[in-house]
Image: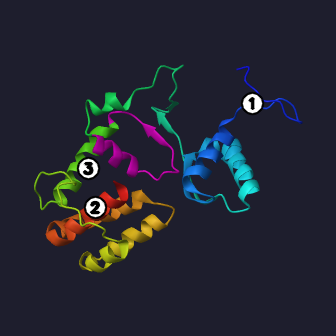
């Protein structure tokens, strides 16, 4: 407060809009491939970023926007004033961080989530089923596989023709990054993948590389 620069139009305050435009220009260049953020940032923040950056460069600022919906806690907005916030550290004391990632990926990023910690119990069971299915029925984590270095999506598609879901997975993610649909496809073919370890390994590589 109290910080400003004088200008011909009046006192100008330092603003996060111009900060973000500056960071993006310095580290990402004139055009950003993918820009994320909460849906509440569409206006005014991202519109201001566009206006500033495109006025400077005369180039498109962003090719693809990903605006995520909010996470509510038991039908209430999470906020410090309501006292209903918790930290990731709190969750990770009880749940595998991969379970939380899996839980979030089960929802489309533009769909609001009504979260309750107990939802992670169901996600734990589903994630365990997925891991076992991709490891031939054995209890193991999805990351218990050696990654193929520098495997491109085209190479992966060529290798993974056997299971019949490779192109469907790519199509789901190309449809507005529909991770929910992609995971549903994997579950639908899980019994088939459990019988074909070579295909299951390739699906694991895909899940690791694309969904982390």
Gap between marks 3 and 1 measured at Cα: 49 Å
Tag 2 secondary structure: helix
**Of 189 and 63, which appears nearest the observer?**
63
Mark 2 touches mark 3? (CB < 8 Å): yes
N-term mark: 1 or 2: 1
Q: What coloring was used for the rendering?
A: rainbow
The reply to whether residue 67 is in sight is no
Residue drawn 67% across the image and 41% down it: 17
Q: Is residue 109 left or right of residue 92?
A: right
Q: Residue furthest left?
A: 138
Determine whether 79 is above or below 128 in the image: above
Q: Which residues are magenta?
A: 97-118
Q: Is residue 74 magenta?
A: no
Tag 3 secondary structure: helix
| Location of residue 149 in the rendering, given as x and y in whole percent from the top left corner | 26, 66
Q: Residues within 10 Å of mark 3 (few under 14, many from 20)?
A: some
Q: Is residue 67 left or right of residue 91?
A: right
Residue 13: numbered disc: 1
Gap between marks 1 and 2 measured at Cα: 52 Å
Q: Residues within 10 Å of mark 1 (few under 14, many from 20)?
A: few
Question: Circle 2 is placed at which residue position?
Answer: 187
The reply to whether residue 139 is in sight is yes
Gap between marks 2 and 3 measured at Cα: 9 Å
Tag 1 secondary structure: loop
Determine whether 206 is above or below 121 in the image: below
Task: Report how many numbered discs are placed on residues in the image.
Answer: 3
**Of 33 and 9, which appears nearest the observer?**
9
Residue 126: numbered disc: 3
| Location of residue 120 in the rendering, given as x and y in whole percent from the top left corner | 31, 39
| Location of residue 188 in the rendering, given as x and y in whole percent from the top left corner | 29, 65
Residue drawn 65% across the image and 47% down it: 21
Residue drawn 21% across the image and 71% down it: 199
């Amino acid at each position: 407060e109290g910080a400003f620069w004088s200008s011909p139009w009046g006192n100008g305050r330092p603003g996060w809009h111009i900060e973000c435009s500056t960071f993006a220009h310095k580290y990402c260049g004139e055009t950003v491939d993918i820009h994320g953020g909460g849906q509440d940032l569409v206006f005014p923040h991202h519109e201001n970023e566009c206006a500033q950056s495109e006025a400077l460069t005369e180039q498109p600022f962003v090719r693809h926007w990903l605006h995520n919906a909010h996470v509510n806690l038991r039908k209430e907005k999470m906020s410090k004033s309501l006292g209903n916030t918790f930290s990731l550290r709190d969750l990770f004391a009880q749940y595998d961080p991969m379970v939380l990632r899996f839980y979030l990926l089960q929802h489309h990023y533009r769909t609001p989530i009504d979260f309750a910690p107990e939802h992670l119990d169901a996600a734990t069971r589903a994630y365990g089923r997925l891991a076992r299915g991709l490891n031939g029925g054995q209890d193991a984590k999805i990351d218990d596989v050696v990654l193929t270095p520098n495997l491109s999506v085209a190479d992966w598609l060529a290798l993974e023709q056997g299971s019949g879901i490779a192109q469907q997975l790519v199509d789901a993610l190309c449809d507005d990054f529909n991770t929910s649909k992609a995971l549903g496809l994997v579950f639908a073919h899980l019994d088939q993948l459990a019988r074909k370890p070579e295909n299951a390994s390739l699906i694991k590589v895909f899940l690791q590389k694309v969904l982390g």
